[in-house]
Amino acid sequence: MAIKNFSAPKRRPEKPSGEPILVSDYMTTKLITFKPEQSVLEVMDLLIKNHISGGPVVNDSGELVGIISEGDCIKQISESRYFNMPMTDTKVENHMIKEVEVIDGNMNIFDAAIKFLQSKRRRFPIIKNGKLVGQISQKDILKAALNQKGYNW
């Protein structure tokens, strides 16, 4: 006989009152990443299949080298059509954003929310010892706020 578990989904542990809520408490660590040598067509396929709007680009050592987004892919589609060029040979490294802003995993989640508002970005990578360790998105900030409702930041 199978036993069914009807317990509610687990929430992230709440921190004791007065302790800051950190970006590392809510960042995503299981990321879909891209390689500079991947084709833009492959990236578009993965963005659609995984219901994401973009992701970090890393080299073979796991170091962040850029970010590629839906907007970058759309720009490539537009340029390809305008110049009547096939998209089969387009590589991520030629279309990714190379100047990437990062957030410290030890930053307070409230300070991260302000950084999102100031920068108009949708996601920030988190780097530790030169390697990509996670990413925080606007949605992660919303999750943190919902988990803390009734509490002070």
Image: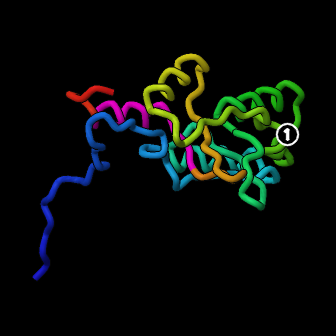
Percent x, y of residue 110: 43, 27
Residue 138 magenta: yes
**What amino acid does circle 1 point to?**
Asn
Q: How is the image coloured?
A: rainbow
The residue beneath circle 1 is: 94
**Left or right side of 89 for 19:** left
The part of the chain drawn in magenta is 134-147
SS at badge 1: helix
For the view shown, which residue lies furthest in the top direction? 118
Q: Position of residue 27 (x, y in %)?
A: 48, 44
Horizontal and vertical percent position of residue 42? 70, 51
Q: Quadrant of the N terminus?
A: bottom left
- Which residue occupies 59% across, 39% down? 104
Please tell me which residue is depicted at 60% across the width and 43% down the height of the picture. 126
Quadrant of the rendered image containing residue 66: top right
Towards the viewer: 16 or 65: 16
Q: Is residue 139 magenta?
A: yes
User: Residue at left 65%, top 36%?
Assistant: 102
